[in-house]
Image (spheres, rainbow, N blue to C red):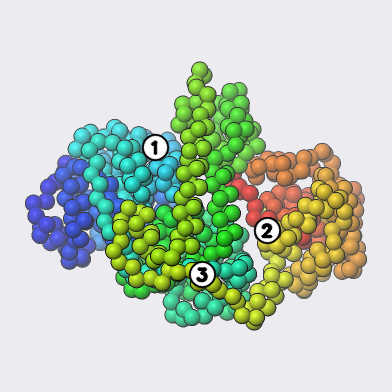
Amino acid sequence: MYFQVKTRIEAEKMLQKVFGHEKLYDEQWQTIDRILKGERILLIEKTGFGKSLCYQFPAIWFSGITVIFSPLIALMRDQVAYLKSKGISAACINSGNDPATNGAILEEAKQGKIKILYIAPERQENQEWIEAVRAMNLSMIVIDEAHCISVWGHDFRPAFRRIINIINLLPPGFPVLATTATATARVADDIIKQIGGNVRLIRGNLIRENFNLAVIEVASEDAKLAWMAEFLALQKGKTGIAYTGTRAYTELYALWLQKNGFSVIHYNAGLDDETRKGVEKGLKENRFQCVVSTNALGMGIDKPDIRFIVHTQMPASLIHYYQEIGRAGRDGQPCRIVLLYHPQDKELPLSFIKNSRPPREFYDRVIDVLKKEPLGEREVIRKSNLTQTHVRVVLHDLVDQDIAKEAVYDRKKVYEIVYGAMSLNTETFQILREFKIRELEKMIEYAEAKQGGMKYLCEYLGDPASLCNDDCLRRPYQPRDEWRKKVQEFRENHFPVLDVQSSRTKLVNGVAASDYGFSDICSVIRKCKYQNHCDFPERLVVQTLKAYRTWFIDEEFDIILYAPPSESGDLVKNFAATLAGRIGIPISHGLKRQKDTSPQRVFQNGFLKKENVSDAFKYVHPDYIKGKKILLVDDIFDSGATIKEIGKLLSTLGAAKIAPLTIAKTAGRDMKT
C-alpha cells in the first residue's frame, strides 16, 4: 500500500517528529513525493546531500519492508544504529555477521518485524535469501551506489545485476529508488535502461564549494612520503584520509608516518572484520590524525568533519576521484583535497585496466573444466588454476553471454555449460577497455589542467559549474634535504613482517629484508634466479642481516634451515650458508623435498599453492629437530604456503620455535580463496 502525502508541510511535520530535521531540500521532497506515488527514480546527488533520507522517510509510511541493496558494510552499520536510535526497526545482512545472526534477521523480516533492511548484493546468491524474499511483504526496493550496476560505471559489480531480476518481477506502480553521487550521462542512461519502466531522473548540483583542490607534482615515491609528513605536521587537530593504490602501500605509508610521530593507521580489504571496525570507529572518534587506505575505506563512513583527502596514487578515472574525495567536508566546512602526481603514476591504473578482463586463455580454461561437469566456484578455482578474482569475472561473463548458467544441486550453487551456445564474444571487452583508457586519460588531463579542478570535475560529470574557488594548478614539490635523508633512512630500515604465527604450530612471525616491489630488489632476485643463475649479491646479504639483527635482536637460535628449492639450484642454500657464517649459527642441510613439486609461482591461487607443497618435505634426521629454535631462510615470501608447510613439519618433529627470514616479501596474490 502506497501513500501520497498531500503537502510538503505535512511531510516536514512528520520529518521533524521522527528524524528531527526541520526542512527538506527541494530535490529531497521531489524524490520522496514521487516515491510515495509509486514511481521509479534515479537520484544523482553529491555526497552529504542526504540521499539516505529520500528512502528512509518514505519507508516509514509503507506497510511493508523496504530493502536497500548496498555494497557498503560500514554504511549499513551506521545507518542501522541511527534508525534504531529514532525508534525505527532496522537491520543489515552482510558477510560481517555470523550465519546465525543473518538467519535470525531474515526470519524477523519475513514476520514483518523489520521496517528497513540493508543487504549486500552478493547475498542474493544465498539460497536462504532467495526463499526469504518471496515471503516478505515488500514495499520498496532501493539500489544504493547504483553506478555499480553499470559496466560503464567506475565500480561495476556483477552482483548488482541480479537486483534487476527482482525488479523485473515487481508490479507496475511499485516504487524503486536508485541513488548515486557519481554517474556520467552514459552511466545514468544505462542505469535507467536496466531498471526499466518509466524512470524519472533527478540530478542535483554536484559542486562542493567548501573544497580546496590542489595537484602537487612530485619527482618520485620518496618525495610523496616526504610531502605527506610535512603536510600532516600542518594539520594539527584535523583528521583525514590518505588513499594509496595498493594494500602494501597502505602499510608502507602508515609505518613511515608513525615513525615520524604521527597518529596514523592503515586500512585495506585484507584486514579482518574486527580490525576494520576498530579503524572505522577510531577515525570517527578522532583517535587517528590520518588513516592510510585503499579505496576500501570512506564509502559509507558517517563522519562529517573529514578535513583532508590526499591521493598518493592517481585513481583510474575522474568518477573514482570525485567519489573518493566526496568523503570529505560533509559538514560544509573547508577541507583540503590534494592529488600527488607523477607522470609515471598512470602505469598502475593502466595495468589494472588492461587486466580488468582476463585473457581469452582463461575463459577457455573455465569452459573446459565446466564441460566435464557442473562445478561450484571453489572447484572451478582449483581445476582451472586461476585466482578467485579471475574466476568470478570469467563466470559472470560466461553467464552474461549465455555460455554457462547457474544451477542449484543439493542446495549448492554450481555453474554448468549451456551446450549449443554461441562462441565467446570478446569485442565488448575491448570496447570497455578502450572506454576505461579514455577515462584514465581524462584523469591525467585533470592532473595537468590549468583550470580549476572542481569546475573540471563537475563539467565532466554533466553538471556545468559556474563557481570555482580552488587553487588547482600544478605545483612542484621538492623535499628538503632533511626529509630526503629521513626517507632514505626509512627505506633502509623498513623490514616487512611475515605474518605466519599460528596456535597450531611453533611458527612465529618473521621478517623480510625488503618489500619485493619497493626497490630494485625484485629485478636483482629475478636475474639471479632465472637469468644469470648466480649467487645473490653482497648487498642482499647485508640488508638481510640488518633485518635479522633488527627483528631478532633478543632471540637466540640453535640452527639455520633453508627451504629446499624447486628450480633455483643451490641459490638459497648458498645464501643461507653465508648468513649462517656471518651470524655464527650452525646450518643444517637436512631439510629435503620428498616429492616433486612445481614452482609456487606457476600457481595462481592459494588453494593450489597449499596443495602443491602439502606433505612435500621431510627432515633426514628427525630426532635432531626436537627442542631446537630454528631460523628458517628463504628468498621470497609470497602466499606463505611453503613456510607454513615446513613449519607444520618441524612442529610435529618437536621444534621449540621456527622463525622465517627472507630477502623479500611480495604484496601477495589473490588470497581471498
Neighbourhood count class around disc 2 (C-alpha, 10 Å): few under 14, some 14–19, many 20 upward:
some
Quadrant of the image occupied by residue 84: bottom left
Q: Quadrant of residue 617?
A: top right
Q: Quadrant of the C terminus?
A: top right
Q: Mark 1 = which residue?
A: 162
**Which amino acid type is marked by label 2?**
Gly
The answer to which of 531 and 474 lies nearer the viewer is 474
Q: Quadrant location of the N terminus? A: top left
Q: Which residue is mark 2?
A: 517
Q: Residues within 10 Å of mark 1 (few under 14, many from 20)?
A: some
* Left or right: 78 as drawn, with respect to 277: left
Q: Residue at (51%, 37%) from the top-left corner?
A: 430
Where residue 397 appears, as percent x and y from the top left, is 49, 34
For the point 72% across and 45% down, which residue is it?
601
Judged from the image, the secondary structure of the residue bearing numbered disc 2 is loop
Say which of marks 3 and 2 sits in front: 3
> Does label 2 or label 1 sit earlier along the sequence?
1
